[in-house]
Image (spheres, rainbow, N blue to C red):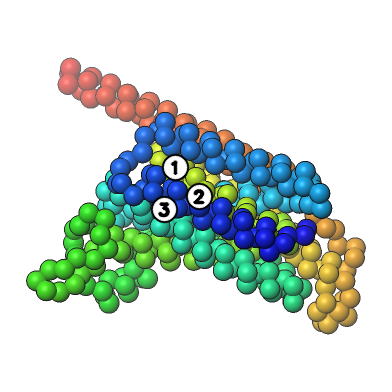
């Protein structure tokens, strides 16, 4: 895939322009967006991402193989980003961020995520170009992250974790918000507001998710341009999606398990690829294991899409069943209470 410096410059400039527009058009004035506004912009950004994938398929020298890699990467990054939103929701609930300021917090968090992922993309591309054995490391890391995702999700509160307790011990913090200001002066002394703590917490979580997402997408494509654009489009519209599916986030009870399956699948795919291009002297004498299968991108795309769909449907079915069960128990409890009162 031949990407000229000019294409990179235009892509990065357009990405920055979208986020600048977002800030001045929607975030600068604090307000809680409506469902209709969130739905329109979410649909716009998702549509834009899909159109970009089709464009990749038609551009001479790029083609549909790279388009398939982009779509698989975009779907994976979007799913991981929604999981990221769930953690953002926990953080903002833990810090009791007023709803009209949540847009600004989300925007800052998304920008930090894009910057961190951009840095990891550059590092990942350099490692892959110079060290083929890095695929073993990425594969092992993803298998570990898959295990953690499946069995440790939601066990801790990021707003009150060890990192945030460390921050609180070393920064003078006020108890209340002062608009959307990060610091405030009281009695001649400068204090930080809870808003700054929220941003620090989100920045730390962004770092953790960058460690998850970049090895995952490099398991689907070696093209840094596809990695960057898939991440950029996955993050675009994430702010609107938060307000659109805010209630739905808590109903996606199997999202963590679905992501764990995806990460494990990509981890295995990476290990297979590492064996297929092996250069490590203590494995097969430093020769590639050509009999090890390479998982095609079309299978990866179908597997990821099916996993996301199954996790979503199963989550909604479970929460619907739990709600129906709770409603029945509530009705039975009221009937028992009524019968007791009658006696």
Q: Position of residue 9 (x, y in %)?
A: 62, 60
> Residue 107, which numbered label?
3
Q: Are marks 2 and 1 in contact (CB under 8 Å)?
A: no
> Residue 320, which numbered label?
none
Height in image: 124 above or below 95?
Answer: below
Residue beneath the point at 86% across and 62% down: 292
Q: Which of the 4 image quarters holds residue 244?
A: top left
Residue 180 located left or right of residue 201:
left
Cα separation, mark 1 vs mark 3, equals: 10 Å
Q: Position of residue 267 (x, y in %)?
A: 69, 61
- Judged from this view, the residue extending furthest toward the left is 187
> Residue 18, which numbered label?
2
Cα separation, mark 2 vs mark 1, equals: 14 Å
Please name whichever residue, 264 or 10, is drawn nearer the observer in this view of the structure: 10
Q: Residues within 10 Å of mark 3 (few under 14, many from 20)?
A: many
> Residue 240, which numbered label?
1
Q: Residues within 10 Å of mark 1 (few under 14, many from 20)?
A: many
Q: Residues within 10 Å of mark 2 (few under 14, many from 20)?
A: few
Height in image: 60 above or below 12?
Answer: above
Residue beneath the point at 81% across and 49% down: 60
Height in image: 155 above or below 68?
Answer: below
Residue 210 located left or right of residue 158:
right
- Judged from this view, the residue extending furthest toward the front is 6
Quadrant into which the N terminus falls: bottom right
Whichever of callouts 2 and 3 sits on the residue coming sooner in the sequence is: 2
Cα separation, mark 2 vs mark 3, equals: 12 Å
Q: Nearer the viewer, mark 2 or mark 3?
A: 2
Residue beneath the point at 32% across and 41% down: 32
Whichever of callouts 1 and 3 sits on the residue coming sooner in the sequence is: 3
Q: Position of residue 339 (x, y in %)?
A: 23, 19
Q: Which of the 4 image quarters holds residue 177?
A: bottom left
């Amino acid at each position: 895939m031949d990407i000229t410096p000019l294409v990179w410059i235009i892509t990065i400039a357009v990405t920055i322009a979208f986020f600048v527009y977002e800030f001045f058009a929607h975030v600068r004035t604090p307000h809680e967006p409506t469902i209709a506004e969130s739905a329109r912009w979410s649909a716009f950004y998702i549509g834009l991402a899909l159109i970009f994938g089709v464009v990749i398929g038609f551009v001479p020298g790029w083609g549909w193989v790279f388009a398939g890699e982009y779509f698989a990467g975009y779907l994976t990054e979007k799913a991981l980003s929604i999981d990221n939103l769930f953690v953002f929701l926990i953080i903002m609930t833990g810090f009791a961020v007023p709803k009209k300021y949540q847009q600004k917090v989300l925007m800052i968090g998304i920008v930090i995520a894009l910057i961190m992922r951009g840095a990891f993309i550059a590092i990942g591309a350099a490692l892959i170009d110079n060290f083929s054995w890095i695929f073993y490391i990425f594969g092992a890391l993803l298998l570990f992250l898959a295990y953690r995702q499946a069995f440790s999700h939601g066990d801790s509160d990021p707003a009150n974790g060890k990192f945030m307790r460390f921050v609180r011990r070393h920064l003078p913090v006020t108890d209340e918000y002062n608009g959307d200001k990060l610091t405030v002066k009281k009695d001649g002394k400068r204090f930080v507001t809870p808003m700054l703590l929220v941003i620090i917490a989100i920045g730390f979580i962004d770092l953790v998710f960058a460690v998850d997402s970049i090895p995952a997408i490099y398991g689907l494509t070696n093209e840094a341009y596809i990695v960057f654009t898939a991440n950029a489009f996955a993050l675009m519209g994430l702010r609107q999606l938060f307000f659109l599916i805010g209630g739905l986030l808590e109903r996606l009870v199997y999202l963590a398990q679905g992501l764990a399956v995806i990460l494990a699948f990509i981890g295995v795919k990476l290990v297979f690829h590492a064996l297929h291009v092996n250069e490590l002297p203590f494995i097969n004498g430093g020769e590639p294991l050509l009999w090890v299968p390479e998982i095609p991108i079309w299978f990866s795309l179908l597997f990821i899409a099916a996993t996301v769909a199954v996790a979503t449907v199963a989550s909604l079915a479970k929460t619907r069943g739990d709600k129906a069960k709770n409603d029945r128990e509530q009705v039975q409890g009221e009937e028992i209470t009524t019968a007791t009162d009658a006696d």
